[in-house]
Amino acid sequence: TEGFLTAQERDMVPVLCVFDNEEIGSETKQGAASVFLPETLAAISEALGLSAADHRALLADSMMLSCDNGHARHPNHPELADTNEAPVLNGGVVVKHSPRYATDGVSAAVFTAVSYTHLTLPTSDQMGGATLGNIADTKLPIPTVDIGMAQLAMHSCFETMGSRDVETFVRAVRACYESSLRFTPEGVALR
C-alpha cells in the first residue's frame, strides 16, 4: 500500500485492489475469483468515456502485482529449501514461481526490469500455498507476477521477516506504479 500511495502520478490509472476472504473464500462476491476487479476496471473505463476496444487495449498494456509473502529458508529445517536459491530474510524481493503462482517468464522479466530488484526464486520441492494472483488473473487477461518478502513461520502467531526487506519491497512496488508498459509484438517497451 505504501508503494502505491507514494508513487509519482503518471498518465495512467493506478489501481490497488485488496481482496477479502483470502484463498479459501476467493469465490465470494468480494473475493479474487469474483467479477469485482474486472467489473470495477470496466466501470472506470466507462467513466472515462473509453470504448470496449479502448478498455481491452488498456488491459493489454497492464500488469498485475500479486503481493503476498514467501517462505524463507528456515534455519531449523534447511532440508526443505533449495541449497542454492532459497529466499532468505533481508535478501530482497521474492518472485515466486510454481504451478500455484501466476508468475511466468514475461512477468518476472518485466518486474525485474521495472523495479531494478534482485530476484530470489523459491525452488524448493515443498509446495507453498497459492496466492490470489493466480486466482484473479483468471478473470483478467493481463500478465501477473507473484511477489513478496521472505518470512519464517507463515500463518503463525510469530511470523518473522527482515526489516530491510520492507523498504526494498516498497521501492519495488513504487517503481512498478511509476512505470508505463507497452506490450508489442516485438516485446515489452518501458516508458
Image (tube, helix red, strand yellow):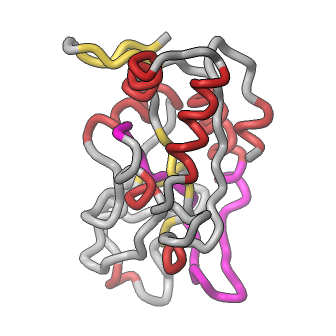
Residue beneath the point at 59% across and 37% down: 172
Image-quadrant location for residue 12: top right
x%, y% of residue 84?
30, 62
Q: Looking at the picture, tell me which residue is in the foreground, 57 or 167.
A: 57
13 or 145, which is in the foreground? 13
Q: Residue at x 50, y 80 (%)?
A: 24
Residue 124 coordinates in the image, percent (x, y)? 29, 72
Vertical position of residue 73 compared to residue 112: above or below = below
What is the x, y in percent for residue 181? 45, 19
Q: Using the image as rendered, state which of residue 189 and residue 154 is in the foreground.
A: 189
Q: Is residue 126 left or right of residue 34?
A: left
* Residue 45 rendering spot, x and y as whole percentages: 58, 25
Q: Magenta segment range?
A: 141-166
Residue drawn at (58%, 66%) of the image: 29
Residue at 50% from the left image edge and 36% from the top image edge? 117
Residue 102 to residue 51: above or below: below
* Visible residue check, residue 184: yes
Please tell me which residue lies in front, 147 or 93.
147
> Residue 106 colored magenta?
no
